[in-house]
Amino acid sequence: MKAKVGIVGVANPVESGGERFPELMEGAVKALKAADLEVVSYPKLIEVPAQAIEAADLMNAEDIDSLVVMDITWAIDSLKYIFTNMVKVPTMYWAVPYTETFSIGCIQHYGSILKAMGYTYDYVYGLPGDAGLAEKIASYAMVGKAVKLCAKMKIALVGPRQTWRVCGPQDMSKEEWDFSKKTGVTLVHLEMEDITRIADTYSDEEAEAKLQELSARSGKSVADKKALLYMAKVYMATKEIISQNKLTALAAECYPNYGGLMNLPSSWLADEGIVVDTEGDIGHTFIINILNLLAGGGAVALGEAGSIDRERNILPVAHEGSTAMSLAGDLSRAQINPSGELGTFVGVPLKAMDPITVSSIVGNGGNYKVLIAKARTLDVSYDEWVAGGSKLIVNLQFDQDVQEVMDKLMAEGMDHHFVLKEGDYTKEMAAFCDYMGFEKVIL
């Protein structure tokens, strides 16, 4: 999951400070590599358009995730414009702390033009060895990686609607076209029967062997063995479908007609970095994948508000049960429960985590709003987990009053689903939304 960052140095030959370029570039490359980045550098100080074009071609050929433009001195707009127009990746501008160069003023000036023209950017100020500087660039590079991978995402909608229309698409909706056009994500239509047919080809012996393997990272089970064997078959079939179609993720039809069919496979796959949503929720499948990209992996929980606890100032969040069992903290706390004859759901009292990133998405017509908030989760007792239905239970707490939080979500018209990711990725999510043109709702 290493991000690849390109770096160039720009200057004006009539300004002072250009002689610092070799030392600054050498230090910058060294610092960025130490921050676990793959680095592509243009070796010459860029002072004329021909050099800028050559450097831009290099960056495109290397398929970088983000670009760093270091203003060694004041540089004219038309020089940096070449990178803006030719290298279409998230770009960070680096100001050096030498007053006579007007480096920071130059970035403020060019940044004002970018903002006026609808572009987004970020900047750093300082020398290569300054604490936190390379790490900020590395964080922004992961945003660039997430942006680039959007266009390569293939999310399957498993269980699409039957062919019908008024005056638009047939077996697809205009909403799918709008979302795909905005994000670059390719949507793939499959049927639940595509998975169950493959599942039926596996023998009980094959399922038993796979179940033994999966049990090593599963909680306790109170489900029937027959159901567990079928879940192992569905798990293997889902992985086969993913491989056949080269999918990034699935948003699977589940509730109500297929309740319990995909929950346990979803939980198992989540700990492998594969996202399977169990309510056909393409938008939040997308957001989960973005958070995983920004974090470099890991599992994400999805749930919705079950109540408002003003006394403890928490939002008890619950869901039907498809979360990675590792998020219980201790596997002994997670439980596989029966759901119908062959279905299951996973009970996870989510572990205490501080901080976490909370997100969600809503919108239509290519216009989307994304919730971005930092919060924490508090420990869930056994009694309240049972009282909540032995499913996913989360004690979600924000720094604000919980009633004010819910009022804000209602006022902004945010969706009911919450995506919860351990760690603080709010700045990265904000930068991602800026680049993608999503409206931000920040708590």
Image (spheres, helix red, strand yellow):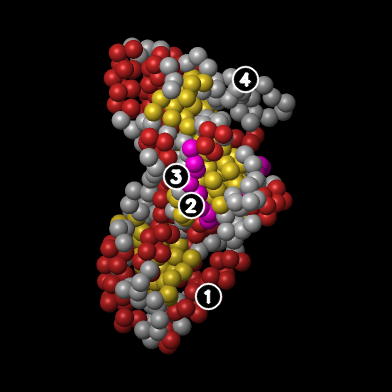
Residue contact between numbered discs 3 and 4, judged by CB atoms under 8 Å: no
At 57% from the left and 69% from the top, the residue drawn is: 113
Q: Which residues are magenta?
A: 363-382
Quadrant in which residue 119 is drawn? bottom right
Between disc 1 and disc 2, the foreground one is 2
| Mark in front: 3 vs 1 | 3
Q: Earlier in the sequence, mark 1 or mark 2?
A: 1
Name the residue that disc number 1 marks: 108
How many dots with numbers?
4
Q: Is residue 285 visible?
A: no
Asked whether 250 or 305 is in front, the reply is 305
Q: Which mark is residue 351?
A: 3
Label 3 with label 2: CB-CB less than 8 Å: no
Q: Quadrant of residue 233?
A: top left
Q: Secondary structure at mark 3?
A: loop
The stretch drawn in magenta includes residue 369: yes
> Could you tell me how far apart the alpha carbons at marks 4 and 2 are, in whole angstroms?
39 Å
Q: Residue at (34%, 48%) from the top-left corner? A: 1
- How far apart in space, not on screen, are marks 4 and 1 (Cα)? 53 Å
